[in-house]
């Protein structure tokens, strides 16, 4: 009996010593141990996982931002915004490392550059497409490469990178091509309220009920045969929502001869902003007279039967 107790005591002591040694490896500042295999890993081999996120902050007022989006921005180390601006976002980006996200920086088809004016080539008259400032091919390539380096170095170092957008990044969003360019980093999109959602709320009208047969979201352009295609869609009973109409007068003038003058029209500007949002309702034949010389900004243009 005494011999058995002695063997048991020795086994218990040995077990305690082994456990203590294993715990020492697991809690050491320089090493880690796998509890199953006993493999020891140095701290230099244990790295944080970085991330890349395209984050929508919604549209209009700041409280239209989702909780998820706010948390993602708060956790980000590096932020890319349009033009590197931070004034739109209050204190949300305070203390962050800020870079310029550009506009359609990694788009496959960049508009033709006019070196004499620094503008993208002007489109045909009455198409709704005005000129935009644009970088030269050399400037664009340099900005693309700098952005690649910043993002890839940051993610490799375990940092969190956020590309900030407004509205729905997948509906005519200027930064969606970041997803393709950095697909190997497994980027994530944090969705947000679209200007389309916010504008519908202001209109207080269903886009898919009553007289509405279908709803189409499209760019406010009429060139390359789009004018006739759009007119046919309106004649068939569809309602169209036009994004980014840069020349409203030209767009209406171009479309007016092709659709009935009594076709309902609505302009929703600054959707989602309680202080600034506004609705102007009219018809294709009278909308330009209704707005007169007023300059409308940040708007969606609705045309079709859903407005009846």
Image (cartoon, grey):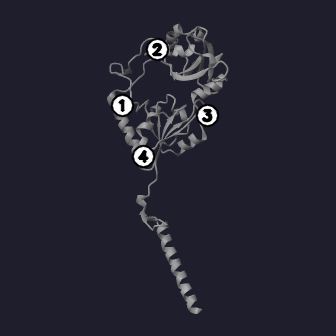
2 or 1: mark nearer the eye: 2
2 or 4: mark nearer the eye: 2
Identify the mark at residue 281; answer none if there is no mark.
none
Residue holding disc 3 = 64
Q: Is mark 1 on a helix, strand or loop?
A: helix
Q: Is residue 166 above or below residue 160?
A: above
Label 3–label 2 contact, CB within 8 A: no
Q: Give the distance between the C-alpha atoms of the residues marked 2 and 1, in whole angstroms.
A: 27 Å
First in residue order: circle 3 vs circle 2? 3
Q: Residues within 10 Å of mark 1 (few under 14, many from 20)?
A: some
Q: Give the distance between the C-alpha atoms of the residues marked 2 and 4, in whole angstroms.
A: 42 Å
Identify the mark at residue 127; answer none if there is no mark.
2
Residue holding disc 4 = 154
Q: Which residue is drawn at 51% across and 74% down?
A: 20
First in residue order: circle 2 vs circle 1? 2
3 or 2: mark nearer the eye: 2
Looking at the image, which residue sits at the far bottom? Answer: 2
First in residue order: circle 1 vs circle 3? 3
Label 1–label 3 contact, CB within 8 A: no
Question: For residue 66, which quarter of the picture?
Answer: top right
Camera-nearest residue between 234 and 100: 234
Quadrant of the image for the C terminus? top right
Quadrant of the image for the N terminus? bottom right
Q: Where is residue 197 in the image (x, y as percent from the top left)?
A: 60, 28
Q: In this view, does 244 lie above or below 166?
A: above
Q: Where is residue 255 in the image (x, y as percent from the top left)?
A: 51, 11
Q: Give the distance between the C-alpha atoms of the residues marked 3 and 2, in whole angstroms.
A: 33 Å
Q: What element carries label 3?
A: helix
Residue holding disc 1 = 140
């Amino acid at each position: 009996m005494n011999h058995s107790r002695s063997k048991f005591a020795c086994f218990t002591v040995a077990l305690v010593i082994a456990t203590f040694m294993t715990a020492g490896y697991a809690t050491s500042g320089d090493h880690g141990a796998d509890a199953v295999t006993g493999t020891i890993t140095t701290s230099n081999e244990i790295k944080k996982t970085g991330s890349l996120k395209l984050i929508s902050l919604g549209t209009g007022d700041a409280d239209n931002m989702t909780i998820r989006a706010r948390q993602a921005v708060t956790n980000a180390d590096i932020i890319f915004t349009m033009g590197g601006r931070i004034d739109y976002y209050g204190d949300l980006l305070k203390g962050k490392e800020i870079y310029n996200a550009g506009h359609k920086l990694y788009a496959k088809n960049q508009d033709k550059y006019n070196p004499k004016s620094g503008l993208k080539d002007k489109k045909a008259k009455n198409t709704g497409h005005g000129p935009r400032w644009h970088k030269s091919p050399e400037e664009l390539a340099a900005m693309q490469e700098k952005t690649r380096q910043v993002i890839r170095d940051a993610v490799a170092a375990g940092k969190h990178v956020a590309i900030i957008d407004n509205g729905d990044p997948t509906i005519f969003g200027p930064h969606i091509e970041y997803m393709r360019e950095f697909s190997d980093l497994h980027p994530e999109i944090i969705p947000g309220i679209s200007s389309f959602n916010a504008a519908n709320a202001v209109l207080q009208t269903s886009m898919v009920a009553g007289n509405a047969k279908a709803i189409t979201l499209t760019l406010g352009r009429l060139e390359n045969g789009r004018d006739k295609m759009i007119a046919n869609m309106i004649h068939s009973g569809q309602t169209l929502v036009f994004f980014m109409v840069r020349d409203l007068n030209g767009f209406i003038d171009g479309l007016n001869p092709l659709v009935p003058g009594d076709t309902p029209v609505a302009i929703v500007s600054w959707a989602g902003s309680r202080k600034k949002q506004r609705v102007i309702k009219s018809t294709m034949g009278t909308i330009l007279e209704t707005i007169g010389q007023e300059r409308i900004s940040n708007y969606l243009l609705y045309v079709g039967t859903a407005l009846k």
